[in-house]
Amino acid sequence: MTAALEIDGLGVQLGGRIVLTDVTLAVEPGEVVGVLGPNGAGKTTLLRAAIGLQARSAGVVRLGSRPLETLNERERAGLAAYLPQERRVAWNMPAWRIAALGAYDRAPVLAHALALEQLDALEIGDLAERGVLDMSGGERARVLLARLLVTRAPLLVADEPAAGLDPETQFLALMRLRERATAGAAVVVTLHDLTLAARFCDRVAVMDSGRIVAAGAPLGVLTPDLLAGVFALDGALVETEVGLVLAAQRVATKWAAP
Amino acid sequence: MRLILLLLGLLALALLVSIAFGETSLSAAQYAGAFAHPGSPAGEILFRIRAPRAVCAALVGAALGLSGAVMQGLLRNPLAEPGVLGVSGGAGFAAAVVIALGVAGVPGVVEVAALGGALVAGAIVAGLAARFREPETLILFGVAFAALGGALTALVFNLSPSPVTTAEVLSWLQGSVANRDWPDIGLALLPMGVGAALCAYSGVGLRMLTLGEESAALSGLPMARLRVAAIAGAALLTGASVALAGVIGFVGLAAPHLVRGSASDDPAATLAPSAIAGAILLALADLLARVIPTAEELRLGVVTALFGAPLFALIAWRAARSWRA
């Protein structure tokens, strides 16, 4: 099967500073891949480089086995859709109109229907006519996620889709992305909540200082050693009745110790 | 659509009132006579003086309203207007230079200079916009441009050979549609039409920009082309309106605000209503300029600024309250 996204030997520099070094990652249709790591590890830069928003200093990126630089705007949009971390919306457009932007190239009636369908799926169908600037941050985040889900792209790249959502809605958002993967799409998300990552991701790639330091199934990757080394957490993923849960505390720092 | 029809109705009404009323009051018999004999004095007043003037005001208002809506959409800023990127400053400066050089007597020279100045400024802005995507950066360049345009125009005053020239430049900078005739309007129609078409083309991109530069860049739309179309369209409209009527402020700022709420805040759906609202505003402003009894007829730019400045403050007030993101 062709990978929806292939990143090979990717390097990125921002203002002379090395942000990503030799990152290699492939995402297949049908899987949800979580990109994890502490703040500043390079998660967002990786996603942006993967989709062509960030210039590379080294490496190759392919979308649907085609090199990124050979794609025009329309082709790229046909192969990948992106939800940025930034949730700013400029104008107070009704929620459904924002969500319908994911299907701007389709018949207006269909775009409207698709938008309502995804807003319903994220349980904000009743807010469809409300202006997005008259909403709470979490509601607006859901509208923008609905916009992502309205697109037909075979690769969905979502930067912190769970940020700013209440716990129940975090599950809902990731369930919807998971469903897209089940339906055949490839999904890449960055997450900070390791419990969510362990529950919803088929594979995780853990980043630290611009490198992928471990990748694979969550349980095998998020070991106590890795949690301590990368996240400065003393703990482990614990199997419970409802699934994996992260039980951990902050590693005592040398300043805290006597 | 209902909004557009409503606005068109209002525009027709505004034009009708503008043509019916003026400095000279006519009797019912004279109105009737004007229609029966367009060549009669009353007919001349209605069809050769008032009608072209009213149509001219409406056209200029439409151009400024559309251009303002495009600028606000492009820069995602409710305080943007046609002058914000220095386009009208460029047009004003070019026209001032031509007047100061004393070649304004040649028909069409000032108009062409104004259009040219707007296009040069527009080309510079488009070049910058291709390089710097962030609207904040563009606005900062625009502030610098507008200041430079103002300074250069002041320089023209400073160096101009005679007070007569100075008065001429000044009166032009204050904007007016007095004494415009049908041929003047005809000349402006081409650049305005092309500008409006470019703006209409860019509408889908302006709508997508609601999500920000990056989401728009990845939406599949040819954003680079749409941005250039938006800037070129706005520059053509602004240039043509400056060529036709001088520099007129605030219409381009106010018109989009008056209709935005009724157009679901959608930058693309705001374009046409904003153009019509601009036409209504300027037709009414020109009517005011004509009927307010003053020794010297009020300049159109002065009227729009007088009413526009408080409106600007009000808009800023409301915008500040609604900026929650």
Image (cartoon, coloured by chain):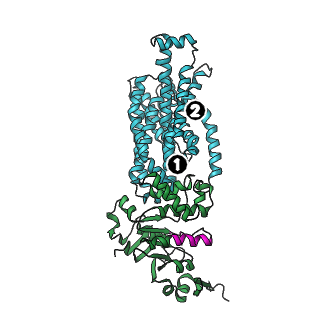
Q: Which residue is mark 1?
A: B266
Indicate the position of residue A249 as horizontal and vertical percent values.
63, 84
Whether residue A126 is visible to the viewer of this picture, yes or no, is yes
Residue type indicated by callout 1: Asp
Q: Name above or below for residue B181 compared with residue B315.
A: above
User: Residue B59, how many percent across, how many down?
Assistant: 47, 31
Is disc 1 in contact with disc 2, using a CB cutoff of under 8 Å? no
Which residue is painted at 52% across and 48% down in the image? B266
Chain coloured cyan here: B
Please give the residue where the numbered disc 2 appears in the rendered image.
B304
Specify the label residue A78 is tagged with.
none
Residue stretch in magenta: A159-176
Give the mark nearer the N terminus: 1 vs 2: 1
Residue type at tag 2:
Thr
Q: Secondary structure at mark 1?
A: loop
Q: Quadrant of the N terminus of chain A?
A: bottom left
Q: Chain of mark 2?
A: B
Identify which residue is drawn at 50% across, 15% down: B45
Q: Is residue A172 covered in magenta?
A: yes
**Tag nearer the camera, 1 or 2:** 1
Instruction: Please provide percent x and percent y for residue B119.
Output: 40, 40
Pointer 2 local density, CA inside 10 Å: few below 14, some 14–19, many at least 20: many
Q: Colour of chain A?
A: green
Q: Nearer the viewer, residue A41 or A140?
A: A140
Vertical position of residue B16 compared to residue A18: above or below: above
**Few, some or many residues within 10 Å of mark 1 (<14, 14–19, 20+):** many
* A121 w.r.t. B180: above or below: below
A24 lies left or right of B301: left
Q: Do discs 1 and 2 share a chain?
A: yes
Q: Hey, which residue is sitting farthest right in the picture? A: A258
Q: In percent of the image, x 43 and y 74: which residue is there? A: A20
